[in-house]
Amino acid sequence: MSKDSLPREGSVWSEGTVLNPFTDFGFKYLFGTEKNKDLTIGFINIILKEELESPIDEIEFINKELTTYLEDASRPVVDILCRTKDGVRYIIEMQNHYYRYMFDRLMYYNCGLISDTVFRGDKTMYGDIKKVFTICLSNFQIEKNGLIKNEYKMCNTKTGRVISNLIHIITLQLPCVNIKNIAKSGKDYESLLVLLKLMTDRKMGMTYKDFMAAVDRIDVSNELKRYFKDLICKAAMTSLSESEREQYRQHLLEVPWEDVVESAREQGLEEGIEKGIRQVAKSMLSQGLSLESISKATGLSQKEISKLS
């Protein structure tokens, strides 16, 4: 076995590293599994601290496959879907690639969930429709406004008055998060996003111990620090079973070619698909994957890949 076929130093396979929460497996493992339900509850309470009347203390994960009313249409699947005791539902999505109809898709999800609570001919149900919160973390800027957190509701465009609270969409733009200011980020949700972004940045080579030390430096409440440390503990590679590690490895090796091509085209990249492939190779490189593995997945030479770091 050549040295280029081995995991790079400080890679995702090192005992001291943590999961990348912005991989499909990592995100759903941390925030969409029964055994890590407390992380999901904490996540929602932190992100929606200003929107919730009171913190939630219990959730139930429900079927992520949504109902569709279009004949022969495939049923859309969200990343994470849960509800609280009062019937309010929470969609949590993680997006690594831009796509043109993102808000149309989010509205479709929300409307589908809302329609499920109203029975045909029963007008008395309208006042009892339960709210849907959608939280979408994006590894790109959906809106070029530099804001970390953007909120969307149905409102009067002239007066700004909200006419319905049933749909509440919140987007969190990771590129707008400044990880250099980890000690004092401001709002609690900003501190959480700083931590998640640090967990995605393999170039910094932070270990489990480094993350724990970083949490101690963050200017937040002791309760929030305990949550952050619990998140790091459960994200540690050593906390995963062998089968979970294998699932994580497979997800890292999967190359979302359709997403890459579509993203490249829709953003109007002159190099189109070629630049999209290089972006994927760069991302895989940051995950600590070997040059040989990346070369086989992308078709780029190991020399080309080395120049991307």
Image (spheres, rainbow, N blue to C red):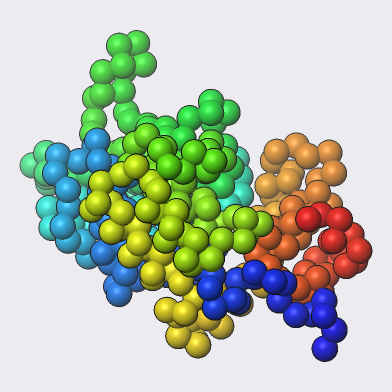
Q: Position of residue 249 (x, y in %)?
A: 60, 77
The reply to whether residue 81 is in sight is no
Give the x, y percent position of residue 145: 53, 26
Left-right relation of 307 to 133: right
Residue nearest the viewer, comparing 118 with 161: 161
Regarding residue 43, the answer to whether it shows in the image is yes
In percent of the image, x 40 and y 48: which residue is there?
217
Closest to the observer, 79 or 242: 242
Question: Considering depth in this image, is 252 or 155 the residue closer to the camera?
Answer: 252
Identity of the residue drawn at 35% across and 62% down: 229
Q: Quadrant of the N terminus?
A: bottom right
Residue at the location (80% across, 70% down)? 291
Please give left or right for residue 218 compared with residue 273 in the image: left
Res. 206 image quadrant:
bottom right
Q: Which quadrant of the figure contains the C terminus?
A: bottom right
Q: Is residue 166 left or right of residue 201?
A: left
Of 268 and 96, the residue lying toward us: 96
User: Residue 308: horizontal and vertical position, in percent?
Assistant: 81, 54
Q: Determine whether 161 is above or below 267 in the image.
A: above
Q: Residue at x 52, y 43 (%)?
A: 179
Q: Position of residue 222 (x, y in %)?
A: 25, 51
Label total for image: 0
